[in-house]
Image (spheres, helix red, strand yellow):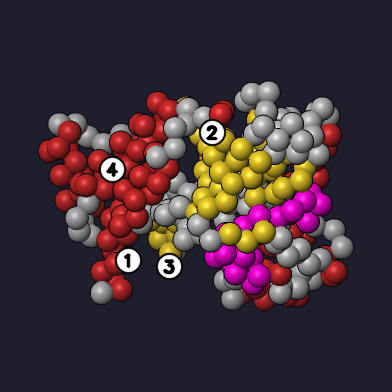
Amino acid sequence: MLNKLSESIYYLSNQNDKDRPTLGLVCGDQYSLVIDGGNSVQHAKDFLQEISRLNVPPVKYLAITHAHWDHFLGMNEFNATIIVNRLTHQLINVWRNYSYDDYSLNEYVKSNKMSSHCMEIIQNEIPMRDSFKLNTPDIIFEHSLQIDLGNKICILERIRSTHTDDSTIVYIPDEKTIFLGDSAYGTITNSLFHFKQALLLLMIQDIQKYDADHFLLGHESICDLDEMDVFWRELISCSRAVTSTSLDCAIETFEKDHQRTPNENEMFFLKAFVNDQRLKSKQG
């Protein structure tokens, strides 16, 4: 079931048990824009079925926020102009050259090119896999792009991100709404979950320059400004407490700075920033 944020914005909530991220719909007077293509053919079809129940303009554009499989494998179903930034285009091209038969999928899992869960979803939710091939994106932009849906402007921008190097956000100025995709999350490198400490403040700066009251995230659905401010404050305070590969030192610094023990979220962030320090120390 679609959630209605305004007369012009709807979203399909994330389903983490199925690795399904939030999908967005922005409607102008003439056209509609979909944000992210879903993790499979079935995910996209479920979204399109919900859209068909609305009296909205036809979907003309599909913006992909980044090149992680759960955000683009369903993109063919929308019969829309696909928009990506240049790096996302390069990364999706790798998947365009994949074969999706069982043997090939198993080989990709063995070589860590995809997860076993991704393989299972492809096998269960993408029919005609022997002939499946991702469409080529139609519009490729460098840094930013403005789309007019008819009295409804959408601004797409590639931002600096702790999640991926190719993160695109979609901002709708008159709605004060921003779709962040997964840009505000951490990432996994060498089996370690971490937030890229060097990019944290730059990412927050890129996002906060937009006047937004509503934030749609890939795996939390929707947050308001107060919730995002808490998220940013916790991330920043934890990042400042981490200057080495020692979690004990990080906790000690945090407790000294705040005169209290870290809460559950803060402990998670502290561990993630310590992991980032560990990864950097190995690179050095």
In the rendered structure, the answer to whether residue 50 lies left or right of residue 109 reads right
Disc assigned to residue 173: 2
**In 3D space, how far apart are the residues under numbered discs 2 and 1 (Cα atoms)?**
38 Å
Q: Residue at x 43, y 28 (%)?
A: 225
**In 3D space, how far apart are the residues under numbered discs 3 and 1 (Cα atoms)?**
8 Å
Characterize the local packing of mark 1: few (<14), some (14-19) or many (20 or more) Cα atoms within 10 angstroms: some
Along the viewing direction, whichever of 165 and 61 lies nearer the viewer: 61
Residue 98 picture location, percent across and down:
71, 73
- Residue to which mark 4 is pinned: 236
> Principal SS element in the magenta part?
helix
The C terminus, quarter of image: bottom left
User: Can residue 90 be found in the magenta stretch?
Assistant: yes
Query: Viewer-nearest of labels 2 and 3?
Result: 2
For marks 4 and 1, the one nearer the N-term is 4
- Residue to which mark 1 is pinned: 279
Q: Amino acid at mark 3?
A: Asn
In magenta, the rendered stretch is: 76-94
